[in-house]
């Protein structure tokens, strides 16, 4: 691979931005902070684009065998290979790898990241923590690029933890607010559970393969073509736990809705477009393992489908604009897992890319709405905004159509690809397809519900200060809207052909049928249309109906609006017993009884010894002198008893070589005197 | 002659030391210490250390003991009080002193190859080289730096003594100042 | 007159030195006045000096005498500082009795 040498530049630029803004930011003029903060992702984007061109060329040349089971591919480009750890049998290199998969991810991370940085300039303009915000955002980009470029599990884990840190810092960005601080903690702790699984998976990989590098694993897998299941299944399930934590899947999704406490551009970048997709990326990156573990793959699919449906139902009744989007993100991530679970990794990544476009757009548009409403996030207090915020309205409309899956918007192509892949995957696949279809209907419904409540109808509250949308916020909106329209036109076939060297499943895939695909597409579009029609009926024509329905089905409505009481259940099952355990075992038994007793015992010993020795320290000078004399006598006695008799004859002084002196004659003369 | 001088001044020495212990008034003790030091100077002379004998008289009998007597008089120190003292001092201290002396004597008397001293014997055997010459050669050539450092040490001691004895914010009382005028 | 021509064995000088040293220690223990205690210390130093001079004579080693010289210098400095401390103590406590200066005990 050519010019892989400057791969390390990609994470370097955001890191420099982080250092500069993090250390000097509060002293620099705001304009300089902006330039540093925005230039860092731009510089990375330029590097990525130049590298991306190279991967396209190489994909075109290596595409001959795509679509069938080919030899396992090794990464295209490796760079920055340093020996990092060398402990016994463990050798880990500091290695960056660029292949088609990481190239696509990098393109999203730096591209969408750059747009969101630009948007943030307007959104965060009046925030006192401006420089801190940009340094954290750059830090996130640094870790995310490291995660994606990593050529082995350990380096990936570094990035994985790093984005968790950046996410924590940015969720709790307004740490003065209690809710934001605790949301940050929640995200961190829930992610720890996932990371625990991931780490166990990494250890298992190490003991099984003896290496952590993706290339090495691929090599040893291709040497044992018959190797399936057992250990691999366990590894994959552990990795799945990690992915579920990071990508907010059941049952570890609870942190993502709370993460909306962070600034909206952060929600767009980290909690919609990039970081939460790290789990999907990780599965795609390690798909060679998953391909050999059908049970784990099935688990992935089931988790994905369940999450997609579960989150979509919660989203139906949420009234906070960002929470609707958060649950929608969880639901769409479920789609991606579903795709991974049926080994349609290309479709998963395709949906990931499209989702990055339209979900970032949705969040940014929502941010624009919130900005205009002066911080109001409640949908029930919005309405009629389409006149006041035309740019936001039109871009939001594009995004809503895209996520609902109407042609020719981006979401149509990617969702279609997933549903089609699921349908082909045996009988269980039909069920998955059906769940996906229901989810698509629900998605369409709640997105149009949001659209109607926020933009159409009459204003429901007299909010006096409607800010206009600044240019720095409008431009990213328009660019993302264009991408949300046109992004899908690449088409899944061209996309998977490009991605094939890195992400083609290495197992027999069912052959497709264009007529069936078209039929399924029509069904999906009809479902989306149905969702739109219901939303139209409830929220435009008969606005009193939702309340009536809620009254008619009090149990269902309460269940949904309280998010199935999952937080409460977790609190009762996990948090409270943990607290009780800490209180009883750790505080009472360990702390009070054992540690306290130990400390008391040591203190008692010291006390008693002190009381004995205290008598010695009378403070009387003469008694000290007496002890001193006794000590001197003891030392001399010791010398007398242990020293040889010759010690007292001072042999040293007899040495004539040192004291050439005439003492011999003296002695002689002394003797002569006698 | 040597023996007579030795016994005479060793006797003075011991008598002075014992008197130092027996006297209860510090000024008497100080005077007996002067006797001890002066007799030691004579003993140094007997051992061929003229320079040290003179230094002993000037530094010890002169400067240091004058300092002592000054302080005794300055503080108007009277007789010793009969205080109870420390039991440890008598119970541990005196056996310890006896042991110390016994061991020291044992050690010193067992040093082999000791000769005897007779008058007129110096350190140097070279003809025409006096003890003083030898001493100053070593002191001002080999050990010049330690010698100079000693002067710094004494300077520091002077400063320290002034700093310690100086009373913070001491002022002449108003009445005395008036009287001075 | 053979008696007069007798030389003095150096061990006698050493013995004298040991006796003086022990007397110094005894003084340190029995004297109750701070200044006299200090004098006892000087006595001990002098006793050590005597043995130094004796050994210097024995081994024809000029360094023994030089050591005595340095001991004198240090003793002079020590006397100056020590007496200043005694003055300071007397100012603070108005007594020179060793047994009353027992602030080292809490």
Image (cartoon, coloured by chain):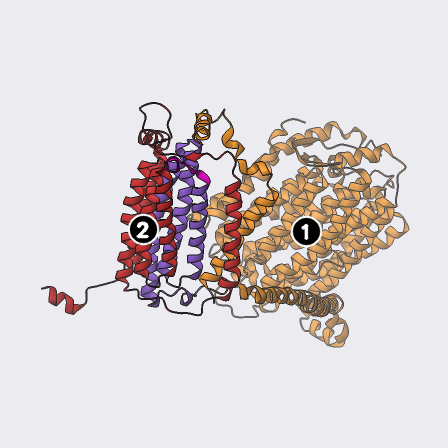
Depth check: give the residue in front, A311 or C103.
C103
Q: Residues within 10 Å of mark 1 (few under 14, many from 20)?
A: many
**Tag on residue A221?**
none
Which residues lie in the magenta part?
A: C1-11
Q: Is residue C4 magenta?
A: yes
Q: Chain of mark 2?
A: B
Q: Is residue A52 left or right of residue B56?
A: right
- Give the chain letter at badge 1: A
Q: Which residue is mark 2?
A: B35
Q: Quadrant of residue A217?
A: top right
**Depth order, front residue of B145/A643:** A643
Asked whether residue A274 appears in the rendered view, the answer is no
Residue A637: image location, x then y, percent: 57, 48
For the point 83% across and 38% down, the residue is A506
Q: Is residue A83 magenta?
A: no
Q: Colour of chain A?
A: orange
The image quadrant where one finds the C terminus of chain A is: top left
Residue that carries the numbered disc 1 in the rendered image: A276
Q: Residues within 10 Å of mark 2 (few under 14, many from 20)?
A: many
The color chain B is rendered in: red
Extreme residue toward the top, this view:
B127
Can you tell which chain is drawn purple? Answer: C
- Above or below for A57 versus A163: above
């Amino acid at each position: 691979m050519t010019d892989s040498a400057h791969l390390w530049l990609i994470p370097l630029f955001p890191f420099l931005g982080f250092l500069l803004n993090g250390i000097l930011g509060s002293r620099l003029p705001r304009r300089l902070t902006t330039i540093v903060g925005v230039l860092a992702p731009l510089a990375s984007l330029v590097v990525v684009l130049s590298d991306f061109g190279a991967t396209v060329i190489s994909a075109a040349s290596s595409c001959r065998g795509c679509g069938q089971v080919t030899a396992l591919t090794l990464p295209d480009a490796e760079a920055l290979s340093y020996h990092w750890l060398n402990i016994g049998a463990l050798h880990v290199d500091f290695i960056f790898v660029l292949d088609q998969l990481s190239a696509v991810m990098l393109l999203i991370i730096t591209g969408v990241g750059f747009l969101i940085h630009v948007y943030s300039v307007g959104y965060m303009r009046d925030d006192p923590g401006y420089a801190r915000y940009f340094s954290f955002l750059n830090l996130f980009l640094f870790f995310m690029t490291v995660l994606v470029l990593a050529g082995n599990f350990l380096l990936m884990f570094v990035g994985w933890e790093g984005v968790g840190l950046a996410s924590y810092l940015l969720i709790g960005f307004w740490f003065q607010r209690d809710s934001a601080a605790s949301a940050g903690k929640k995200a961190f702790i829930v992610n720890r559970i996932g990371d625990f699984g991931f780490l166990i998976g990494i250890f298992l990989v190490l003991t099984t393969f003896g290496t952590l590098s993706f290339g090495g694993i691929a090599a040893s897998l291709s040497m044992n073509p018959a190797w399936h299941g057992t250990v691999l299944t366990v590894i994959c399930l552990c990795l799945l736990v990690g992915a579920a934590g990071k990508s907010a899947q059941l049952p570890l999704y609870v942190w993502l809705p709370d993460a909306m406490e962070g600034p909206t551009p952060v929600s767009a970048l980290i909690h919609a477009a990039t970081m939460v997709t790290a789990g999907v990326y990780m599965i795609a990156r390690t798909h060679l393992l998953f391909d050999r573990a059908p049970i784990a793959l099935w688990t992935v699919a089931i988790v994905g489908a369940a999450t997609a449906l579960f989150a979509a139902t919660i989203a139906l009744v949420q009234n906070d604009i960002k929470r609707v989007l958060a649950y929608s993100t969880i639901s769409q991530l479920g789609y991606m897992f579903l795709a991974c679970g049926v080994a349609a990794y290309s479709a998963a990544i395709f949906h990931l890319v499209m989702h990055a476009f339209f979900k970032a757009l949705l969040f940014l548009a929502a941010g624009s709405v919130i900005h205009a409403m002066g911080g109001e996030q409640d949908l029930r207090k919005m309405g009629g905004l389409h006149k006041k915020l035309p740019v936001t309205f039109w871009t939001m409309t594009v995004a809503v159509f895209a996520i609902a899956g109407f042609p020719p918007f981006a979401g149509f192509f990617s969702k279609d690809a997933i549903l089609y892949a699921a349908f082909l995957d045996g009988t269980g696949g039909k069920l998955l397809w059906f769940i996906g279809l229901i989810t698509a209907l629900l998605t369409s419904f709640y997105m149009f519900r949001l659209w109607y409540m926020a933009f159409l109808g009459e204003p429901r509250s007299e909010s006096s200060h409607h800010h206009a949308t600044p240019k720095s916020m409008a431009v990213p909106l328009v660019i993302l809207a264009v991408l949300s329209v046109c992004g899908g036109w690449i088409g899944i076939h061209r996309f998977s052909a490009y991605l094939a060297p890195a992400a083609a499943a290495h197992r027999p895939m069912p052959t497709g049928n264009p007529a069936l695909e078209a039929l399924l597409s029509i069904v999906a579009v009809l479902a989306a249309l149905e969702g739109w029609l219901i939303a139209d009926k409830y929220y435009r024509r008969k606005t009193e109906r939702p309340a009536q329905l809620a009254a008619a089905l009090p149990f269902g409505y309460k269940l949904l609006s309280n998010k199935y009481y999952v937080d409460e259940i977790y609190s009762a099952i996990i948090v409270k017993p943990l607290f009780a355990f800490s209180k009883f075992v750790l505080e009472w038994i360990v702390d009070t009884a054992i540690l306290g007793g130990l400390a008391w015992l040591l203190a008692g010993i010291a006390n008693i010894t002190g009381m004995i020795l205290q008598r010695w320290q009378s403070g009387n000078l003469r008694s000290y002198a007496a002890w001193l004399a006794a000590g001197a006598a003891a030392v001399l006695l010791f010398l007398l008893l242990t020293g040889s008799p010759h010690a007292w004859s001072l042999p040293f002084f007899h040495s004539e070589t040192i004291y050439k002196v005439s003492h011999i004659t003296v002695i002689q003369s002394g003797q002569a005197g006698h | 002659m040597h023996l007579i001088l030795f016994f005479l001044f060793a006797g003075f020495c011991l008598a002075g030391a014992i008197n130092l212990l027996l006297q209860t008034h510090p000024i008497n003790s100080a005077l007996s210490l002067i006797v001890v030091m002066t007799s030691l100077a004579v003993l140094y002379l007997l051992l061929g250390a003229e320079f040290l004998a003179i230094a002993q008289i000037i530094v010890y009998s002169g400067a240091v003991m004058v300092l002592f007597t000054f302080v005794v008089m300055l503080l108007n120190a009277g007789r010793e009080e009969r205080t109870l003292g420390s039991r440890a001092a008598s119970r541990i201290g005196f056996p310890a002193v006896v042991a110390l002396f016994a061991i020291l004597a044992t050690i010193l008397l067992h040093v082999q190859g000791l000769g005897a001293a007779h008058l007129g014997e110096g350190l140097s055997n070279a003809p025409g080289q006096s003890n003083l010459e030898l001493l100053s050669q070593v002191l001002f050539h080999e050990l010049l730096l330690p010698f100079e450092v000693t002067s710094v040490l004494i300077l520091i001691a002077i400063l320290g003594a002034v700093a310690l004895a100086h009373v913070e914010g001491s002022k002449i009382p108003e009445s005395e100042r008036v009287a001075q005028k | 007159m053979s008696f007069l021509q007798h030389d003095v064995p150096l061990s006698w000088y050493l013995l004298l030195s040991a006796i003086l040293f022990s007397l110094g220690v005894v003084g340190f223990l029995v004297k109750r006045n701070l200044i006299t205690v200090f004098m006892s210390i000087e006595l001990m130093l002098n006793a050590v000096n005597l043995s130094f001079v004796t050994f210097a004579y024995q081994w024809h080693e000029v360094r023994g005498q030089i050591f005595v010289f340095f001991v004198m210098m240090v003793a002079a400095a020590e006397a100056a500082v020590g007496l200043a401390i005694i003055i300071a103590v007397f100012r603070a406590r108005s007594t020179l009795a060793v047994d009353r200066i027992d602030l080292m005990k809490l």
